[in-house]
Amino acid sequence: MTMKSLFRFSVLVGACLASTALWAEPAVVFDMGGKFDKSFNEAAYNGMEKWKKETGKKYLEFEISNESQREQALRRMAEKGASPIIGIGFGQASAVEKLAKEFPKLKFAIIDMVVDLPNVESVVFKEQEGSFLVGALASMASKSGKVGFVGGMDIPLIRKFQCGYEQGAKFVNPKAEVFANMTGTTGAAWNDPARGGELAKAQFAKGADVVFAAAGGTGMGVYQAAKDSKKLAIGVDSNQNHLQPGTMLTSMVKGVDVAVYNTAKAHKPGVTVLGLKEGGVGYALDTHNAALVTADMKKKLEAAKADIISGKIKVADYMADNACKY
């Protein structure tokens, strides 16, 4: 190799290294449903956009369209040297674990699942606590004593929502009936509003007058069905009260945006658990549902919230307490 060709080779190698190892800014891989699902993924997107606005920096992103793309997308980010690399959703756990082992010098994070590695930050939520509160509110608002639940993919995480919701509904009305359906068993269950609408209508036909959807984009069909049927719906993850104002009783909000923002800003390896006490979950009150939630309802909800935080009310966790087995 001549001196001239050696120089060219060195420049080429240097350029490749710069492109793969010097990004040093965050990356996010959104899960099924896309970053504008008006729910879980969109909350994560909002968190990254807040980070971008505050820092003036850029971040890498990718929206998967099928489950096989998870590992490929995370690998692409790792090869570019992005850090931290944030996987949105429990479904990315195995891919995050694999890539975190292959790239131990990079930082990784996952939302809604635990990956126990020294370079991974895992953020999980006490969904049962927020779901308990919206279940309690559903029973307060119900005139029939019958409420419904429409889940997305039938997995333990969504059963966790269902279990908390049922506990809250029966805390207010021990005789309450709770109808529940899951949309499916694959990732497509997160983005099937037509099926969500069908399930909600079936529950309304059985007498339910409030339905809680924990189903990502599928929830859009539930909310439309509630509006069409002149019933009430409850949103999830993001504040969705504005989607069908007047028939959205509330939303069970998760601080996914806050979790993603905090991770992008200051990655902390280990497990972070966010519940009512930490402000990680809650229920949404705004101008869109002000007429539906009375002062007395709010007072009772706040009392229940305080009792959960203090430990006076213990909300069973489907995934840990052998509760609500279906």
Image: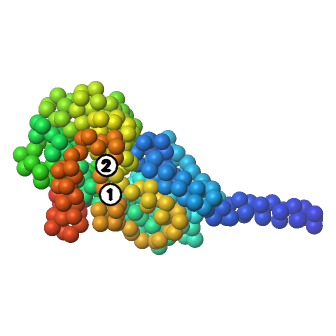
Disc 2 from disc 1: Cα separation: 13 Å
- Inspect the image, locate mark 2, and give the three-letter code of the amino acid beneath it: Leu
**Residue at which label 1 appears:** 281
The amino acid beneath tag 1 is Val
Most foreground residue, 270 or 258: 258
Left or right of 249? Residue 257 is right
- Dividing the image into 4 quarters, which one contains the N terminus? bottom right
Q: Which residue is mark 2?
A: 285
For mark 2, does the 10 Å Cα neighbourhood hold few (<14), some (14 to 19), or many (20 or more) residues?
Answer: some
Q: Element under label 1?
A: strand
Quadrant for residue 57, please give it. bottom right
**Residue at point 55%, 70% (across, down):** 104
Let me know if residue 92 appears in the view.
no
Q: Residue furthest bottom?
A: 118
The one of 295 and 279 positioned closer to us in this rendering? 295
Q: Tell which residue pokes out farthest to the top in this image.
A: 228
x%, y% of residue 165? 21, 50
- Residue 99 located left or right of residue 196: right
Residue 104 visible in the displayed image = yes
